[in-house]
Each structure stands twice: as C-alpha cells, then as structure tokens.
Amino acid sequence: MNVFYEEDGGFKVGAILADNDTSLQVEAPHGKRSKVKTSAVLLRFEQPALSAFMDAAQKSADDIDVDFLWQCCGADEFDFEKIGREYFGHAPNALEAAGLLLRLHGAPMYFYKKGKGRYKAAPEASLKAALASVEKKRLLAEQKQTYIDDLAAGRLPASFKPLLSQLLYAPDKNSLEWKALEAACEQLKLVPARVFERCGAIASPHEYHLHHFLFEHFPDGMDFGAVSAVVMPSALPLAETPAFSIDDETTTEIDDAFSVRVLANGNTRFGIHIAAPALGIAPDSPLDVAARARLSTVYFPGDKITMLPPAAIDTFTLLEGDARPALSLYLEVDATGAIVSTHSLCECVPIAANLRHGELENVFTEQALAIGGIEHRFGTEITALWRLAAQLQAARGKADAHEQQRVEYNFYVDDGRVRIVERRRGSPIDKLVAEMMIHANAEWGRALREAGYIGAYRAQTGGVARMTTVPTPHDGLGVQQYAWSSSPLRRYVDLINQRQLLALFAQAAPVYAQGAPEVMAALREFELAYDSYGEFQRMMERYWCLRWIEQEEATELDATVIRDNLVRFDRLPLVIRVPSLRDAPSGASVRIAVSRLDLWELSLQADFIALNTAPAAG
C-alpha cells in the first residue's frame, strides 16, 4: 500500500512499511525511510506504481483548468474529494485526486488553504487584484530584462536619461531601473559608470566626477537664473593714488589691490583696497540669496563655480583701467617702519594694473630685493610693500630668516591637456600679499570687536581652526582676532563682515545685531560647504595628476617616501601607496613604475623599482 501525504508545506509519496495506527513507517521512491503521522495522509493507493506516481499526478494537475475549477467551487469552504466529484463527474481516482490537490495547493491566489485537504475559493475582487499584481510583476520582469539587454548591448534605455545622475550617485535600490542596472553590471563585470560610458551616456571620467559634485551641491544647476542688475555705487570719493593688484593668471574675481604714496611729511601711506560688493548686494535680495546658497566660489583645475554671477563680478572686481568701489585700509608708516596712524573708508579706487604672477616671479625675487631693486614699472612700490610685509610678519612673531618655502602646484587645462606647474609657496609675492591680507583681516576684526559689532572670525586654538562669532586668537597667524574680510567676491562670510565694516565706518547701526541667527547659520553652513568644496578640489587635482601621467605616457617616475610605503611623486601633488616598497626611510628618493591607471576610481597601481638616494642627515 502506498500513501500520498503532506509534509513541510508540500506533497510526497511513499510505500508503507509499517502501520502503527497514529503513524506510519514509509519508504520514499528514492529509498529514504521516514515516520509519517497518519493525520498527514491524504490518499492511500495501490496503483499506479510509486516511482511514476508524482510525475503522473503533476500531469493530471497541469490538465486542470484552474479558472473553471475556481468557478465550480462556490463561495463556501470545501473538501478536495467533494469538489473532485463535481469537477470530474465521478469519484476521482488516486491520480486525479492527487492532481487536484496539487492544483489547489499550487494556486494560492485562487484557493485559500483551510485545513487538511480543505480549501476555499478566493473572493472575486481579491482574485482580480492578485491576478493584476502577478501580471504587473510579469510585465516588470519583461521590462527589466529589456533594460538589461539594452544596457548589455550598449544602448541607454530612454527612461534612464532623466534618472542618470540619481542612478549613479544616489540610487533608489528598489527601483526597476537600478535593479536592471545592477544586473547589467554583474553581467558585464563593470561598475555603473562604465556601463553608462559604453552606452554613450557619460562622455568621460571628468564628467562623471564633476557631475557627482554638482548632483550633491548644485542640484538645480550652476546657472544663477534671473537676478536683478547690479548697479555701480555712485557718490564715492575718488582715491588719490592709483592701485595695482597681484594675482594668478586665471583670477577674475580680483578682491584686493595695493597703493603706495610718499607723503609731504616724509612718511609713506600704504593702501590695502578690498572690492566692495556689499555696496550693491543688499541682505535678502535675490543676489544675496544666490550668494548665500553657494557660500563660496568653488575652485578646481580648468574651471570654477563662482559665488556671484558674472555681472556682479564684472561690476565689483578691481579691473585695471577703471575706478572701482573698494573698502580701503590706509597705514601711515614713518621712516623707521612704525605705523603711526590707521584709518579706513569706502571710496572709488583707480586701478592702474592687474599684475600677474607670471610677469612678476622672474623680477620680484629674493636676489633682486637683496641688491635693492626690482626692475618693474611698480618696482619701487612693490619693494616698499615688501619691506612693510616683513615688518608686519615680525610684529606677529612669525619672522624667520630661514623660512621654508614649500612647493605648491598650479593646474592649467586647455582642450583636455593639462599643465601642472610647480610654484613656491612663501615666495616674496606670496609673503607680500599674505601679510597685507592678514593685517587687514586682523585690523578690521579688531575694529568690529571694539565697536561691539558681530563678525565672522576665523580662529585657531589648540591646533584646531574654526569659524566663530567670538573674537578669538588665531594662534597659527599670531593675531588676537582674524575676521575674514578680504575676499567678499569669493566668500560669503567676508561679505557679511564687509556689511558690518561699511556700517561701522559710516557710523551707522550694524546690519546684523549681536546673536543674529542668520550670521550663526551662515557660519555653520559655510564651514561645511568650504570643507566640501576643498575636498572636491583635491579630488579633481588627483584626477588631473592621473591624466597628466596618462597624457605624458609616463611609466616611471621619481617619488619621495613620506613614511612606510606612502610616497609623494616629485613634480606632482599626488600621494599613493606602493605595496612593494619595503624598509625605505622617510625622505628617501625612489623610482616608481606606474601602471593600471583608473580615472573612474582615481586609482593608480605602482611598483617599487629602486632606491635613488637616502634622506639627508638631520
């Protein structure tokens, strides 16, 4: 005798070896023996043969029209044997009964299981909803496969185009498009960006990295939209002495300029002139809201995203050949180098020239200063400014005759080709500009503090730098307070400070009262944005370093060991790990082989070749 029984949510058959009333000892067709409760048995049969029973029962189940069966069942709960007699028109045999059970059990949308061999037909509304869900899933599965096939063939599905950035940078992992992309990636053994590259949706790794940043920080795009026209302020006094600026070749937001004038009493008056966009950008105006949203200009090799729209920059940048509004700090210095008086005012400053690093670096050198002359049309003024800068540095306690000049790098990108140019940080040009800015920021910070006006200060104590509204020392610079005020075209906190300074020097009420929530919020958000923008700049510099290696077809480069297997390439601001480098002392010069460069992941595989030199003693 054989039995058809239910176990673990499914049906099985077996030959009875022993009947113990409440349980049976059965042997499965494949020989496994097990104990089965009598209550689990649905059918007992002799024929057909046990080995062929399940296949035959499944064939019988497949022949049953499930829709017709559902219509036969009515609304009440039923026993499978009873419905079998109605469906087949006779008492079903073992195969028919088993097939019926398989069919009932295999169609849970049509029939709800109510107990051993008992079922109930699903209500019509529930069945329709379930069938619609199944159909929807079928169609989605077909659509998903179509997406996968398209992506694998290098075609971008039309529905992916508006979702491209989201799929790359913040995917909804429950969406059909992501599931299809994930499956295509697994099939092609590629990351999503490379799959989209094959489809022509991403032009280059540069576009991929840039759009990632824009997706996170500029979701509405880089355009400013419609902003009101900026009007040049009028009725400002004209400065007596023309000024000149000193900037990198690519600078368009020229915030600062300098003037030098010998007075009748023999003293020298030095002017530090800062562009004054606060005169034309009212708080909460559309232009202010746009600047507040960005908080800073974003710099990266080959391009930048300005804090202010081009029209505002063109109006207030200290452009040569024109007189531009500026907040000026004047220092009167006597023959000994002592500052005998200081005063600030808002005025219109004639800009005689925008000097660039490239034209100055060859003439404005330590050697030229040592022999007492700079061969330049502004050589006398630059020399005087240099001497003042040295005195200001000494007054901060930061003068050092053996000041280290670290190397920095400028990136110039033209039609996809990159030049990476070494530049000494701490050169005479840098020291002159830096000292003038440090003095202006410290002096104006002091003025705000003494007047009780709230300001945005950059503080550093215990080696930690932060933004604060409290006038706090900046230990690194050696000043009692440092209010960022010298870059109002490029930093929103400088624009805040300039509004306060303009009010202070005009003897007006402050624009922002103590504890102003908008200032506190701007400082918090500025720090976050400034850090994010800096990280993006470093990432894009790493990209262009790798592009330079690829562009120059460099296979071997020299590097300097930082520590362990961490090295910094010579002539490139690129730091990587070289796993094969062992036991080389810090400072050692090594020869490195580069290979397997990946611009998408910004990675580079490198191998140690040889030790060039040992580090210098001491």
Image: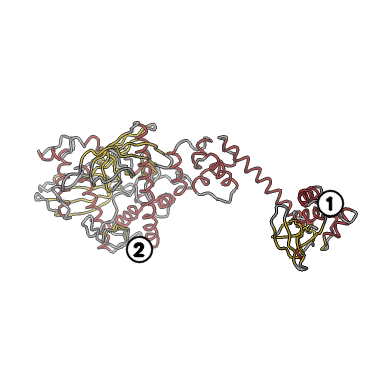
What amino acid type should be assigned to the residue bearing mark 1?
Phe
Q: Tell me the crowding category of disc 2: few under 14, some 14 to 19, or many 20 or more residues within 10 angstroms, Cα based.
A: some
Task: Answer whether residue 343 is visible to the viewer in this image.
Answer: yes
Residue on which the image places disc 2: 513
Q: Residue at x 55, y 50 (%)?
A: 172
Say left or right for 616 vs 296: left
**Closest to the observer: 450 or 582?**
582
Q: Amino acid at mark 2?
A: Ala
Q: Dot 1: within a 10 Å radius of its alpha carbon, few (fewer than 14), some, or many (20 or more) residues?
A: few
In primary-sequence order, the first of circles 1 and 2 is: 1
Q: Secondary structure at mark 1?
A: helix
Of labels 1 and 2, the one closer to you: 1
Please provide percent x and percent y for residue 54: 76, 51
The foreground one among 605 and 302 is 605
Numbered tag placed on residue 336 in the rendering: none
Q: Which residue corresponds to mark 1?
A: 68
Residue at left offset 45%, top offset 47%: 218
How does the figure colour the protein chain or chains? secondary structure
Location of residue 436 in the rendering, given as x and y in whole percent from the top left corner: 22, 49
Q: Residue at x 37, y 40 (%)?
A: 605
